[in-house]
């Protein structure tokens, strides 16, 4: 059975060092149970303050996350009018998912810290020794840490991946274990879908390097091998004409190509061919479609000019 007299005495001793509790006791100096009631009031105030502080922290985190999800734009890097809506939509989705994930983590951390501190403070006010509890929690944390090292590694890697914006939903990446389009990103795993439709679940802690084909912009390029005796100037002029045609194509220019295609001239020499290169900077993940269009137009232009392409080894 709980000895209320002893409990009241213990709370009264603690109450003398608490400014709020001691002030309440002074208002009713002749009430023997006032220290216990004052202690209960202080505990209620601590709990209420903890929940208010938790809600305020969550609101601040939500406001910061919403601002982070909507701020910034990459369209200023490209010429005005080039698929700005598409670029903004992609970047907004990336920022939104990253911000929501980080916001969820920060809210959980804030709740644990604030409510945990409030619980420890309440236990101290109740004269319950918290040193053994902290020791037990520390030992339990160490045991869980040893038993869940891989899980902790995955979460830490996921945190850094989100903070550094290494990739996001919709990106085509090479994660080492799998290559595909990112469908979902969590703190523990990344879900990819490859070209054959298989879904891969890759633990973040196992990803040691990432090749991102969809961040910011991509590049479509094509090597054009022509006979060794071809006129270099004529071939280069022909490829530049193809580049001008592609740049003048309203559909490609507005939704896929970012900058004017470039012809780099002779890139390689061999005993049987001269290899030219033509490339174009494109929107993320649009390089495959632009490359197909480049191949089609270059082949048509070479056939019209009577220039054959030489197979390369």
Image (spheres, rainbow, N blue to C red):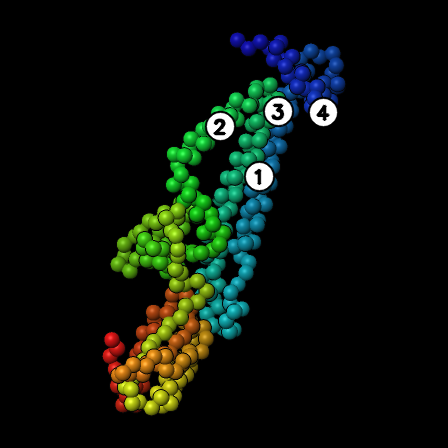
Which callout, 1 or 3, points at the residue further toward the start of the chain? 3
| Residue 55 numbered mark, or none | 1
Which of the 4 image quadrants contains residue 256? bottom left
Q: Assess whether mark 2 and mark 1 are in contact (beta carbons under 8 angstroms).
A: no
Taking the image as shown, residue 16 lies to the left or right of residue 154, namely: right
SS assignment at label 1:
helix
In-front residue for pair 81/147: 147
Dot 4 crowding, Cα within 10 Å, few <14, some 14–19, many 20+: few
* Marks 1 and 4, how far apart at CA: 26 Å
Say if residue 173 shows up in the picture: yes
Taking the image as shown, residue 292 lies to the left or right of residue 103, namely: left
Which callout, 1 or 4, points at the residue further toward the start of the chain? 4
**Residue for badge 4:** 19
Taking the image as shown, residue 162 lies to the left or right of residue 295, namely: right
Residue at screen point 51% across, 25% down: 135
**Residue for badge 2:** 137
SS assignment at label 3:
helix
**Residue for badge 3:** 43
Which callout, 2 or 3, points at the residue further toward the start of the chain? 3
Establish if 200 lies above or below 150: below
């Amino acid at each position: 059975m709980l000895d209320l007299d002893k409990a009241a005495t213990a709370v009264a001793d603690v109450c003398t060092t608490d400014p709020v509790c001691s002030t309440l006791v002074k208002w009713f100096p002749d009430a023997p149970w006032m220290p216990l009631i004052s202690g209960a009031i202080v505990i209620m105030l601590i709990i209420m303050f903890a929940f208010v502080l938790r809600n305020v922290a969550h609101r601040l985190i939500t406001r910061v996350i919403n601002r982070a999800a909507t701020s910034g734009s990459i369209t200023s890097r490209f010429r005005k009018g080039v698929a700005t809506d598409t670029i903004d939509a992609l970047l907004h989705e990336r920022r939104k998912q990253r911000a929501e994930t980080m916001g969820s983590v920060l809210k959980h951390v804030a709740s644990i810290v604030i409510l945990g501190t409030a619980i420890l403070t309440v236990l101290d006010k109740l004269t319950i020794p918290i040193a053994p509890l902290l020791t037990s929690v520390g030992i339990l944390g160490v045991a869980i840490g040893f038993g869940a090292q891989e899980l902790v590694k995955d979460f830490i890697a996921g945190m850094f991946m989100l903070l550094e914006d290494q990739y996001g939903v919709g990106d085509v990446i090479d994660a080492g274990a799998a290559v595909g389009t990112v469908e979902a990103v969590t703190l523990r795993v990344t879900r990819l879908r490859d070209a054959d439709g298989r879904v891969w679940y890759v633990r973040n802690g196992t990803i040691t390097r990432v090749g991102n084909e969809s961040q910011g912009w991509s590049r479509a390029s094509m090597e054009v091998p022509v006979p060794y005796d071809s006129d270099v100037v004529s071939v280069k002029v022909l490829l530049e004409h193809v580049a001008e045609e592609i740049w003048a194509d309203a559909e490609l220019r507005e939704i896929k190509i970012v900058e004017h295609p470039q012809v780099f001239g002779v890139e390689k020499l061999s005993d049987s061919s001269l290899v030219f290169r033509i490339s174009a900077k494109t929107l993320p993940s649009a390089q495959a479609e632009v490359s197909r269009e480049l191949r089609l137009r270059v082949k048509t232009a070479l056939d019209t000019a009577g220039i054959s392409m030489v197979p390369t080894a």
